Amino acid sequence: WTGFLGGHPQAKTPKMDALAGLGVNFTNAHCVAPGCSPSRNALLFGVEPFHSGLYPFYKPVPESIRATRKSLPQFFRESGYQTFGAGKIHHASKGFPAEWTDYHKPEWHKLEYNPEAGYQIGKSRKMAFCPTRNPLEEHPDYKVASYGLEVLSKTHDQPFFLAVGIVKPHLPFVCPQQFFDLYPDPIQPPPIQLGDHDDIPWAGRSMAKISDDFRFRTDEAWERVRRSYLACISWADFNVGRVLDALAASPYADNTIVVLWSDHGYHQGEKRSFRKFSLWEEATRVPFIIWDTREQGAPQGRICREAVSLIHVYRTLVDLAGLEPPSDVEGVSLAPQLKDPSIPIAAPAVTTWGRGNYTARTEEWRYTRYFDGSEELYSHTDDPNEWANLAGDGKWNAVKEQLAPFFPDADKGEEALMLDVKQLERWSITGADKPNLQPLKKSW
């Protein structure tokens, strides 16, 4: 729901819109996984979940991964860079010592909510959708951006890598009142079709957060939720702008590569769902902009419509820095697309949500296959809202056959795991003698 992606007609994101005009706006970009932790682990370590095993939420990252792989900031640090981080980079807001020269340690302030001006479910600190009463300086994202300003204001005698992790619009949807004031008019709902789930297989329907949709409908709260979401996006835009303005005023304005990305998308009632955690467009599509300030005189308003995955970020940054990435880093460099956004990318953008659930996105198609073999297929040429599942129509088998090879061949392993789980259920029901389960537990 940003201006530069045309995601909502009322969205106000002037700073990010300006950045999109300066760099290359990847309008068909998709996360590696529609959840904070697996998405960030994939991007920062350059490895797909089906190759790392990092499907669920990990905080901190397992030592087994750190022992065998170098994260993006760690790679830059070991390549002679100073590395500075703040806010949410990994899923946790703390830095790993091998990665960072310095990591921001903010002073904590409790935010005071104003639910009377919005919506809050009981006294939940997370399920709040309302303005805050605190001054700007007491908000975490303001502090994180201020750290970025501080780094950019200093003189550095070696190259540096700066990661500024702005949390909003993550739940709770709370931010200063002035950003709610940007949206005084009724909020236009997104396109929603009744009966949207009728042609979706059970595995897909189970990913929709229908309980949230039911509560918001019952409380007549959807408009307040969506207004809060837009306000938080504008608040994020404000802080992105502060960092970009500081870059423009710094000695590094013409020698910096800027990447803006989001770890996943978000449902606001589409597919009767709220939050992320699905393999539909609303959850996988993300903002993604790259601006190489060293390209003086580059044309503005460059758009790449190729389907791209955030798995490419690691190799792209390392390539643009003139370095050689570790051999186990996946993805490809997008440096060619920065020169010519029309250059095609050989592979679709693949998103994973749990072992066995994959979706492949091209410029025209989305093909999804779940752990039980059920499928969805959508034509984004004719059906951008993904309302008509074509997977059961044999007319389109050739499309599925073209995209299926990009999914991992893990069916046999998944089938065995499902049988093991069913066997465990039988043992618990019948009270039969149980074998030694330690090897099975370790494999899990």
Image (spheres, rainbow, N blue to C red):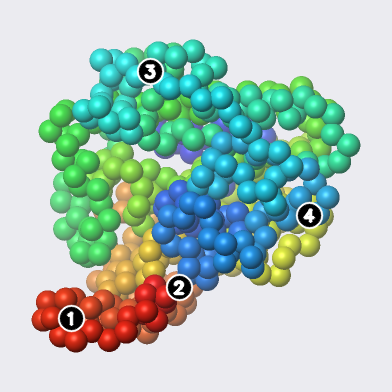
Q: Amino acid at mark 2?
A: Phe
- Label 2: few (<14), some or many (≥20) within 10 Å? some
Q: Amino acid at mark 4?
A: Glu
Q: CA distance from mark 3 to mark 1?
A: 51 Å
Q: Residue at x 69, y 25 (%)?
A: 149
Q: Amino acid at mark 1?
A: Trp
Q: x and y percent of residue 434 in the render?
A: 23, 84
Q: Going by the image, does 370 lie left or right of 342? A: left
Residue 23: in sight, yes or no? no
Badge 4 marks a residue whose secondary structure is helix
Q: Residue at x 80, y 32 (%)?
A: 252
Q: Is residue 220 above or below residue 431?
A: above
Q: Which disc number belongs to residue 407?
A: 2
Badge 1 marks a residue whose secondary structure is helix
Q: Quadrant of residue 280?
A: bottom left
Q: CA distance from mark 4 to mark 2?
A: 33 Å
Q: Which disc number belongs to residue 82?
A: none
Q: Which disc number belongs to residue 78?
A: 4
Q: Is residue 311 above or below residue 160?
A: below
